[in-house]
Image (cartoon, helix red, strand yellow):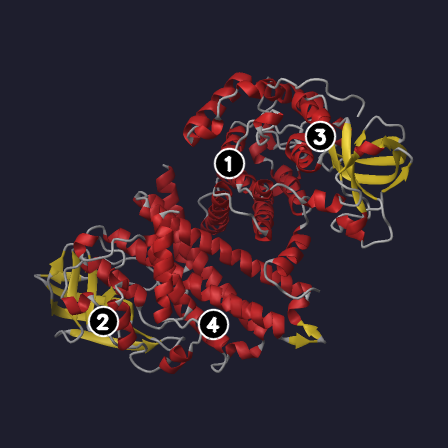
Amino acid sequence: MESWVENARMIVDSAAAIVPADGAIARVRAQRFQLPGFSRAVFAEMGAMGWLQLVLPEDQGGAGLGMRECTALVSALGRGLIPEPIIDALFAQRLLAGRAAPEIMDGRHVAVAGWQDRTDSLDFAGLSSASGRLSGVKRHVAGGAGADVFAVLGAEGVAIVPADADGLQIETAALQDGTFEATLTFRDVAAEWLPVDDADKALDEAVLSQSAYLLGLAERGIDMTLDYLRIRRQFGRPIGSFQALQHRATALKIELELCRATVQRTAARIDAGAPPSVRAAAVSRTKARAASLAFLMAREAVQMHGAIGITEEADIGLIVSGAIAAANRFGSARLHRGRHFSASERSAA
Amino acid sequence: MSASPSQTPVYPAADLPDFEAMSDDDFRGRVRRFVADAYPDIPRFVQRRLHWDEVKPWYMALSRAGWICPTWPREWGGMALGPGKHLVLIEEFERHGCARVHDIGPVMLGPLLMKYGTEAQKAFYLPRILSGEDIWAQGYSEPDAGSDLADVRTEAVRDGEEWVIDGQKTWTTLGMDANRIFILARTDKTVKKQAGISFLLVPMDAAGITVRPIRNLEGHAEFCEVFFDAVRVPADSLVGEENQGWAIAKALLGHERVFIGAPRLSGNALARLRHLAEARGVFGDPALRDRYTRLKMDVDDLADLFETYVDKLRGGEAIGPDVAMLKIFQSELYQRISEEMMELAGESAALREPEGGDPKLHAAGTWLAARPTTIFGGSTEVMRNMMARYVLDLPPG
């Protein structure tokens, strides 16, 4: 057996420390709409387990693992609907590459990436930085309401900016799932750029990780919906015995397995060092599939559960709100279809 | 069987190298050279199935080289390819547009006889498949047993040392070309329908058999009806035990169940869609571009899922009922692509022959070719029923 398989299994097993084995999401429910929208203690625990440094090479203090292991872990966390900003934190660590204080590296302080210039765009080079002072806006920063520092990505590299830096304004907004995102506005904020080795690749890895999170989330929602089809009775029989619903359930399963295959094989492509255009085409295809899957799961979960699917009291309601909150992060399916087309034309040329 | 083998046959395969010991790339190169050297002067890249008089030279070229039964073991004259190498072989044949031969014998009956046949049946029938002496047809479907295949009515009654067969088969692929047919026949009407079916081998020239070709909308006769009127075959025409036929028919090789969901049909159709869009000068249209990209990503995602199953085959893992996903998605995707082609073709979608003689512009041909893929080899509806039951564990309907 290839070594990554065993690594991935061990890491996914370790996720049980954060995501209860019985699948209970009481902690997630209790956290809803409570600022900062996630638990700093749980975040620190994740750091203590070494997850934040998972894919960093060993000479940067990381575990030197690949995207196959990383996506396996993130997918397990998605299954548990965790509200901690793991993907934006992993992205931050990837950009910082071991060049930050120990408490940032190990998760005692929360660092997340501020990278996005515009909504539904992968542009990240828009900040102006005249004589080392940043001006501009970074949007949709997950965990921004509870972060200690931001790893701010720009054309010149990455800058470590503390949340209380002079000139930094943080506006938070509640999301559908009870977490919060932030808009960061920089006005002449003092900062020093650190060079970033291949920011495009780091961003592709984050996009793929978001896809893996959605895969786990959708799998959970589909499992819960199938359970419901087995037990819910109407007209004297379980509703899962009706062919119309059975065929829709198989459609969900097929979409789920297509998504799983693309996530796993795209992670393998990155680990094998795919060239940039091949990588971008595969990552965007994966994200488009994952976003579509999440929305499909949410629609079908609601329809098959009935109106309880859009209530706060039902667990499936939390899954649905999680899908709405997570599906378009790191770009919608529409954005990624366009990017996939351009990238595949480049790689075919 | 009219004769029993008196000596061990000599197969060309005995002199073949160990293909499994080669790298995939080396093997691929070897297949390419083989096609370049051995492919006869017959059409390539044909969407319809060729008839025996057209495709026979290719079958015989494969037979002479010992390449006609890729997955059979060496002791029976096969190439002894594992799933990975077999896939390479199929891919290269497709890439070069090689016509599909009459492969029911090599693909279905041969492996089935190796598993369930008597020594005498194996010794008689297998060499005749290898040599091209026997071309087999599959007699499963009936007018009243389509998706509900276990409801076969064709009856076989034992009369002394013979079976007497009465009934009708239909949708028999290239049955008019075959000299033998294997059928599912009812041998016990008193039990649950699956438990009363037997598997029989029948020569097509037996007295009482009538064949009627069925012409499709393109004017080709790829299927036929086969009528049995008091057809008598010897008792040893039975494969396996009496009333075991359903289990035998279901035991299709694991990797055939994977390969039937290969993304090639959809991938080829997608290339034709693009060719058509470019020929019409509309490939730059943003709305079309978006729809094309959705279809392209579906093809690529299917390829990822397909490769996941091929990896399982390579690793010797068992293939479960979930493999039906591949064929369900592939066939529906193929159809969606063909629908896009029809819209793009405009009025030319109506043409019987390809526009300007270019088969890649032939929208109607693709649309028609895509139709049966959701019907044959397990209809999409039946496969979804099976998945709901055996993969998703939903309650029976």
* Relative image position of residue B365 (x, y in whole percent): 64, 37
Q: Is residue A183 visible?
A: yes
Which residue does the numbered mark 4 point to in the structure image? Answer: A320
Q: What amino acid is found at the position of numbered circle 3 in the picture? A: Glu
For marks 3 and 1, give the CA distance. 58 Å
Looking at the image, residue B396 lies above or below residue B48:
below
Q: Secondary structure at mark 2?
A: loop
Which residue does the numbered mark 2 point to in the structure image? Answer: A110
Which residue does the numbered mark 3 point to in the structure image? Answer: B119
Q: Secondary structure at mark 4?
A: helix
* Relative image position of residue A208 (x, y in whole percent): 36, 56
Which residue does the numbered mark 1 point to in the structure image? Answer: B279
Q: What amino acid is found at the position of numbered circle 4 in the picture? A: Val
For marks 3 and 2, give the CA distance. 72 Å
Q: Chain of mark 2?
A: A
Q: Are marks 4 and 1 on the same chain?
A: no
Q: Are marks 4 and 3 on the same chain?
A: no
Q: Judge left or right: residue B266 versus residue A134.
A: right
Question: Which marked residue is nearer to the observer: mark 2 or mark 1?
Answer: 2
Q: What amino acid is found at the position of numbered circle 1 in the picture? A: Ala
Q: Chain of mark 3?
A: B
Of the 4 image quadrants, the one containing the N terminus of chain B is top right
For marks 4 and 2, give the CA distance. 27 Å
Q: Are marks 3 and 1 on the same chain?
A: yes
